[in-house]
């Protein structure tokens, strides 16, 4: 298998085509009701599996990719800030598509759509489970049946998170770049004439150097102990692609397997201290800190599939959430946008 150019830059995964993905710690929502977007509370540390060959499980070495530490029932979201050029990104949870609920595929599909459109989609907090809503990503052990993978497939074999990026076809990308060049010239002309113009996109940080590719994985059950289930519902749209499917490349430019590690395992494998325990959401809200609401008036929400609408929250397996809850005051919900490294080795998976 060839090196497909996935790299770590700090805690950011950079996939070919200019796709940047960060895993962000956040407040876990109550499993009833629909809520604003919770805040980001710092990045999860991300490390390459290849850097710890003597301490990671054998299956992980074969599969390659990266790992990050996460607590039981801790919530996370995926940030795509830093992605500049158009890209299609597939997100799998235990090799179940988080957008369509269909099995993992190395091809893009529109019936149903099985990918996100970047940079229009700024982040993803959970599975596409309702009209204009998602259910939050929450870490849970394999073996209980509580993961999205377990509920959709009836098995818990893979765990973790899978990412796969597709650029525009060469001709379409050249057209987009030419149009961006013209837009940039128009902005500069407007600014020189005293107009306001718009900020130019920031360039991506330089990635790290190359690393070798992993060996095939074989058919053994992977050793990953954690996967993603779902928690509470929040107001977030998953945007429909308005480009023809034929505009995208037929094959992925890069992919990466993200292993989820319990804090004790993280310390054993890496020798590093895991992040502190998750922040208590009630204390956060009582402190008057902000929640968020994001809306793009020019984009169309992608309807959920029956498969993902039926996924149950992890509380059905782990018991009710006993944390006290206080709704944020209206002034705490901040509107956003429109008003209301190194290469990562790959293996077989």
Image: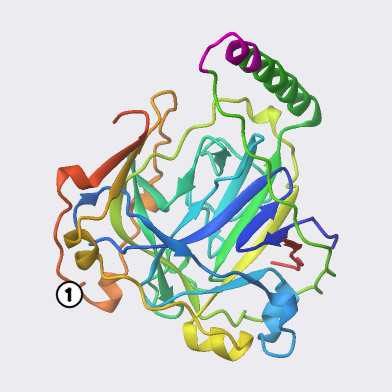
Residues rendered magenta in the picture: 188-196
Q: Quadrant of residue 295?
A: top left
User: Could you tell me residue 172's position as x and y percent?
Assistant: 74, 25
Residue 250 shown left or right of residue 135 in the figure? right
Quadrant of image for the C terminus:
bottom right
Judging from the image, the colouring scheme is rainbow
User: Is residue 216 within the magenta segment?
Assistant: no
- Viewer-closest of 38 and 188: 188
Q: Is residue 20 above or below residue 223?
A: above
Asked if residue 26 can be seen in this view, the reply is yes
Residue 284 shown left or right of residue 217 in the figure? left
- Viewer-closest of 195 and 300: 195
Asked if residue 219 can be seen in this view, the reply is no
User: Could you tell me residue 273's position as x and y percent?
Assistant: 52, 84
Which residue is located at x 60 percent, y 25 percent?
A: 243
User: Could you tell me residue 6's position as x and y percent?
Assistant: 73, 57
Q: Is residue 299 above or below residue 310?
A: above
Give the residue at mark 1. 322
Q: Secondary structure at mark 1?
A: loop
Which residue is located at x 23 percent, y 77 percent?
A: 319
Could you classify mark 1 by the number of other residues whose Cα lies within 10 Å: few (under 14), some (14-19), or many (20 or more)?
Answer: few
Which residue is located at x 66 percent, y 20 percent?
A: 184
Q: Quadrant of residue 62?
A: bottom right
User: Could you tell me residue 195's position as x and y percent?
Assistant: 53, 12
Q: Is residue 144 above or below residue 188?
A: below
Which residue is located at x 44 percent, y 40 percent?
A: 238
Quadrant of image for the N terminus:
bottom right
């Amino acid at each position: 298998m060839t090196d497909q150019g996935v790299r770590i830059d700090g805690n950011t995964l950079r996939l070919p085509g200019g796709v940047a993905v960060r895993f962000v710690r956040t407040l876990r929502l109550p499993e009833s009701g629909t809520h604003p977007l919770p805040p980001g509370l710092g990045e999860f540390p991300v490390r390459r599996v290849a850097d710890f060959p003597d301490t990671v499980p054998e299956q992980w070495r074969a599969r390659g990719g990266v790992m990050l530490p996460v607590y039981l029932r801790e919530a996370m979201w995926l940030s795509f800030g830093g992605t500049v050029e158009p890209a299609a990104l597939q997100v799998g949870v235990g090799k179940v598509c988080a957008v369509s609920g269909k099995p993992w595929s190395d091809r893009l599909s529109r019936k149903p759509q099985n990918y996100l459109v970047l940079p229009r989609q700024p982040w993803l907090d959970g599975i596409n489970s309702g009209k204009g809503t998602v259910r939050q990503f929450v870490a849970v052990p394999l073996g209980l049946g509580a993961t999205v993978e377990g509920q959709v497939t009836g098995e818990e074999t893979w765990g973790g998170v899978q990412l796969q990026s597709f650029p525009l076809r060469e001709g379409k990308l050249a057209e987009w770049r030419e149009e961006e060049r013209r837009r940039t010239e128009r902005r500069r002309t407007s600014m020189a004439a005293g107009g306001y113009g718009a900020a130019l996109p920031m360039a991506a940080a330089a990635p790290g150097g190359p690393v070798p590719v992993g060996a095939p994985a074989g058919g053994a059950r992977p050793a990953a102990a954690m996967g993603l289930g779902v928690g509470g519902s929040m107001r977030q749209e998953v945007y429909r692609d308005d480009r023809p499917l034929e505009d995208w490349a037929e094959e992925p430019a890069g992919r990466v397997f993200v292993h989820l590690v319990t804090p004790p395992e993280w310390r054993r494998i890496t020798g590093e201290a895991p992040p502190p325990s998750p922040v208590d959401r009630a204390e956060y809200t009582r402190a008057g800190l902000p929640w968020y609401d994001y809306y793009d008036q020019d984009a169309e929400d992608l309807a959920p599939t029956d498969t993902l609408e039926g996924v149950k929250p992890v509380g059905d397996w782990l018991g009710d959430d006993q944390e006290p809850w206080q709704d944020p005051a209206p002034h705490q919900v901040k509107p956003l946008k429109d008003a209301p490294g190194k290469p990562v080795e790959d293996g077989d998976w």
